[in-house]
Amino acid sequence: MLKYVGEIIAVYATLMEVFARRKDHIQIYDSLITSDLSNLNGNFHSASEYRQFFQQFSIKYSVYFGIILFIEFLVFFRISNTSQQWRNVWLINFPIVLFISMRVLYYIFSVDLVKSKLASVRIQVQNAYETMKWVKTYNSKSKEYKATIDKVSNSLIFLKQCYGEIWSIHFNLNNTSGWSICFVIISCFVQFSNHLYWLYLTFHEKTIDGYIETLLCLCECPLTIFIILYSTESCMEVSRNIGTLLHEIPKRSEKRLYHIIYRFSSHMTHQPIRFVSHSLFDINFKLIKMLLTGVATYMFIFIPFTADVPEVEEFITTAPKNYLLE
């Protein structure tokens, strides 16, 4: 029952957070329309880049949601010949799984949206880098040289403003999704630990009854956590690439250009793209180590109590009510 409690808490946390942070949600999309990012889209974003963004998200959506549905329906098919009580449990749990999956997909969509804006900034920083590589062919006193330097400088100033807007969107995203994603990850941790424990019990009792169902359920939570962490990590990687490109831009002894790049880099250092869950933990690949440590601790604590657990075969086939209520 512990895993179902975790799922229900995640659902209620999501509903309360969406209601409490609805103004921040509106502000995110207002920033995309009314800020400098609208000019960034108009000047730099091509139709092919838009298609690439939606294609990448569509692939994530189709793969993730398809696997979740496949696992859930396969589990239902395998338990359809067992007791009515197990089918009722599945029918109650299925809408909760769908709700959590849709929340995860919305979060991934928002993260990918931030990533697409950062990718646009990275492209223009790359263009500035390529332009400054060709400036050395001009005479330093020529009009073409000065015009090129001014163009690159103005472009970097504009991109610095765009980065500030992107950071604000990412900050609002952390505020609007921090608690819900936190409880989703905790719920996945609890479910994975429970399913892993029941899988251990099937091996311990040397029974195959319920083994496949438990193994299928074991796959959902790692998939959910991985797709969240992969999206946030790839977004932060784009941000780090921007900082690397900035330092590689040739300054050509231009003090104004040097100061612009220095301020841009300082801005990125003091306000990095960093996805967090209200200062509880960072949402990146480092979280995997923490979760694995927690799962290992959980297993070492509860495995010694295996002798007090009822027979697995009897539990799965008959599913007495008193075990489900404990």
Image (cartoon, rainbow, N blue to C red):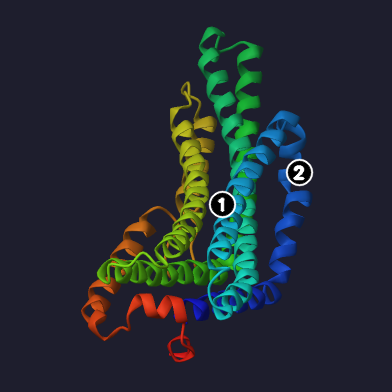
| Farthest left residue in view | 304
Relative to 25, 214 lies left or right: left
> Percent from the top left, x then y, of residue 317?
45, 76
Q: Residue at x 48, y 48 (%)?
A: 230
Q: Is residue 86 above or below residue 188?
A: below
Label tally: 2
Relative to 274, 285 lies left or right: left
Label annotation for residue 59: none
Q: Residue at x 73, y 38 (%)?
A: 41
Q: Secondary structure at mark 1?
A: helix
Q: Residues within 10 Å of mark 2 (few under 14, many from 20)?
A: some
> Percent from the top left, x then y, of residue 222?
44, 57
Q: Residue at x 54, y 13 (%)?
A: 134
Q: Quadrant of the C terminus?
A: bottom left
What's the residue type where badge 2 is placed?
Answer: Ser
Q: Secondary structure at mark 2?
A: helix
**Quick check: can you spot residue 184?**
yes
Relative to 158, 226 lies left or right: left
- Which mark is nearer the camera, 1 or 2? 1
* Of 207 and 272, the residue lying toward us: 207
| Farthest front residue in view | 81
Relative to 71, 52 lies left or right: right
Q: Is residue 155 above or below residue 219?
A: above
Q: Quadrant of residue 308?
A: bottom left
Instruction: Provide the residue designation for mark 2.
Output: 38
* Of 19 and 267, the residue lying toward us: 19
Q: Residues within 10 Å of mark 1 (few under 14, many from 20)?
A: some
> Percent from the top left, x then y, of residue 200?
30, 68
